[in-house]
Image (cartoon, helix red, strand yellow):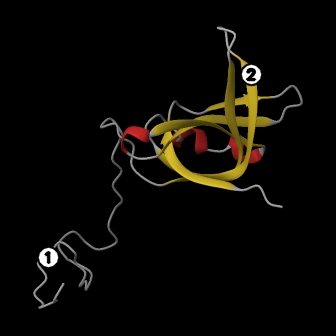
Amino acid sequence: MSNVFSFTGTVGRDAEVRYLPSGQAVLNVTVANNIGFGDKQQTLWIRCAVWGKRAEGQLQNYLKKGQQVFVSGELSQSEYRAQDGSTKTSLELNANIIDLVGKRNESSQPQQSYPSSQPSGQQAPSHDNFDAPYDDDIPF
């Protein structure tokens, strides 16, 4: 039997990297996933962890609040007692894959521009100019 859970969601708070006493790195990030429709819609908060060398890489710099991500890994559920005495449930995912799938919702994200390989006065011919008006009689 396989336990693989995949979803898209939004990072709820900036990712953090911590080190266990053994020296192993773990990157923790909480991701929100909306399920249901209309009045029945609710938000699931899923705590995701990436272990080892992947946790020590540059991923932490990109997993900021508001970033949309695709996450896949092994899902587990645990229960704990809240301060008010009630029993709560926590969803945790040991992530194998975390991919960035959209732009952050914040306007403060720096824009990167890459230099063109063409001199500035020349434009390469392109058949995929999606900004130009399309002059064809497509029936749909």
* Residue 116 at x, y percent in the picture: 32, 67
Which image quadrant for residue 19? top right
10 Å crowding of disc 1: few (<14), some (14-19), many (20+):
few
Query: What residue appears at the point 53 percent right and 40 percent down from the top-left corner?
Result: 63
10 Å crowding of disc 2: few (<14), some (14-19), many (20+):
few
Q: Which circle marks residue 37 in the picture? A: none
Residue with the mark numbered 2: 80
* Residue 78 at x, y percent in the picture: 76, 32
Q: Amino acid at mark 1?
A: Ala
Q: Residue furthest front?
A: 39
When the figure is inspected, residue 16 is found, relative to residue 117, above or below; the finding is above
Residue 98 in view of the camera? no
**Quadrant of the image for the N terminus?**
bottom right
* Residue 108 at x, y percent in the picture: 32, 35
Q: Residue furthest right?
A: 22
Query: What residue appears at the point 33 percent right and 47 percent down from the top-left corner?
Result: 111
Residue with the mark numbered 1: 132
Q: Residue furthest bottom?
A: 137
How far separated are the C-alphas under marks 2 and 1? 57 Å
Query: What residue appears at the point 50 percent right and 46 percent down from the top-left corner?
Result: 9
Q: Secondary structure at mark 2?
A: strand
Tell me which label, 2 or 1, sits earlier in the chain.
2
Q: Amino acid at mark 2?
A: Tyr
Q: Nearer the viewer, residue 139 or 16?
A: 139
